[in-house]
Image: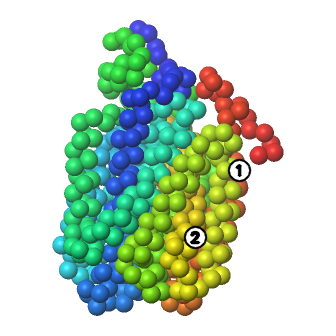
Amino acid sequence: MKTVDVGSILDEGEWSTYQKLLVMGTALTIILDGLDNQVLGAAVPALMREWSLPRPAFASVLASGMVGMMVGGAMGGFIGDRVGRRAALLGSVLSFGVLTVLVSFAGSVGTLGVLRFFAGLGLGGAMPNAAALSSEYVPLRHRAFAVTLTIVCIPLGGTLAGLMSAEILPRYGWRALFLVGGIVPLVLAAVLLKVLPESPRYLARHRERWAELATLLRRLGHAIAPDTAFVDGREKAVVRASARALFVPELRRDTLALCASFFFCLLSVYIGTNWVPSLLTGAGFGVSVASNGLTAFNLGGVIGAVLGGFVIARLGSRITMLVMAAGAIAGAVVLGSVSIAGQPAFAVLAMLAWTGGLINAVQTTMYALAAHVYPTGIRATGVGTAVAFGRIGGVVAPYAGSWALESGGASQLFFLISGTMTVVFATLASVRNHVPRLSTVHRVGTVAPEPASR
């Protein structure tokens, strides 16, 4: 019986068209994850008018979704390492699709909060499995970029949420917005159920699924005999996926730093996405401008994250992510120093695109960093745990944003964001195992030690 090292042939192989299509399929789930995650923030002004409720009444609803995402992130990563990334990802998409459809029938804040919690379970569970799945489809030298292209679809989905809201809310109302936002993921899940395979590195760890792995590798262009045995010599062996494995001595510092980075970065992201539309309407702008503000806050992140993925592949993640974090801090300080109400709409949207773009770019590339830090056996668990901890920041964000707006207006909110992003800068600087620069990654797929100066 011939033995094949799956890690070697994947890490050293080409990034084929089929592999790119697999990453694209995974990325589509995250576009819809980002869309369903952010439609509520866009709908809050309409809900306030229809239900005659003040803005703080929706803080708990926004927070309930974040609690669901926090729990879903931890559970989804654990389930992905146990039963497979594909099953966990598609189950998550089905879950948040169904729950988003049900939100369109909500008649009270209480019902809305309960439905958003359960939708959050699916929204949170999708991302760690998408990150793990896309990273395990591609060669090592393209891993960070593939994960970035996948997770950048979170702000891309947020951009879509803003565009959809600008079109649907004025004409058809918030119920139609959630109905559309729920049906589309259900259609996508049905398609991917037929065409999306399991991670080859996950399959290599399960002898009973080697026949499935052999078929997939042949699809990738490798000649695999029917009786082939498989190993993954490039990954550290992990006996059992568990949170305890994330805190072994060689991973403890990076795990703590990643958890803190995700917490403060997601706190910054959701302060923005939850309250930018309300902030703009409160400053006298119309519903369309408010929806476009959400679009701008996210669209800059799509551009920034894609560029960041390219730069990480060449300069490594440390310097790239720290520069982006510093740019976000500067943008938030500028926004906090001017009166939003007295500015032209274009100028406000441009600054939101810069600041939100860099915040989202940092948040997106953190998934690639986390996927790099952890080995296959605990990759989804590691990413899921860091994201779940970050969701605590998402839970805090509705209350922190509401407090800032009520106590000091837009300036207070943006100065708060500048402070949270400063903490992100510091925690990212403390991560030891950053993605190395291209010059330290040999063409054969091995990684040389990083220079001490980085």
Residue at the outermost left position: 105
Residue 319's tag is: 1
Residue drawn at x 80%, y 42% as measured from the top left: 452
For the residues labelled 2 and 1, the Cα–Cα distance comes to 23 Å
**In the displayed structure, does residue 336 sit left or right of residue 228?**
right
User: In the rendered image, which quarter is residue 328 located in?
Assistant: bottom right
Residue 263's tag is: none
Residue type at tag 2: Met
Quarter of the picture containing the N terminus is top left
Which mark is first along the chain, 1 or 2? 1
Residue 393 visible in the displayed image: no
User: In the rendered image, which quarter is residue 133 located in?
Assistant: top left
Label 2 environment density (alpha carbons within 10 Å; few <14, some 14–19, many ≥20): some
Q: Which residue is mark 2?
A: 351
Residue type at tag 1: Ile
Q: Position of residue 306 (x, y in %)?
A: 54, 48
Label 1 environment density (alpha carbons within 10 Å; few <14, some 14–19, many ≥20): some
Residue drawn at x 62%, y 73% as measured from the top left: 332
Q: Secondary structure at mark 1?
A: helix
Above or below for 255 versus 238: below
**In the displayed structure, does residue 366 sit left or right of residue 215?**
right
Above or below for 57 versus 164: below
Residue 14 visible in the displayed image: yes
Q: Position of residue 346 (x, y in %)?
A: 52, 73
Pair 2/1: label in front: 2
Q: Position of residue 218 (x, y in %)?
A: 36, 18
Residue drawn at x 66%, y 39% as measured from the top left: 314
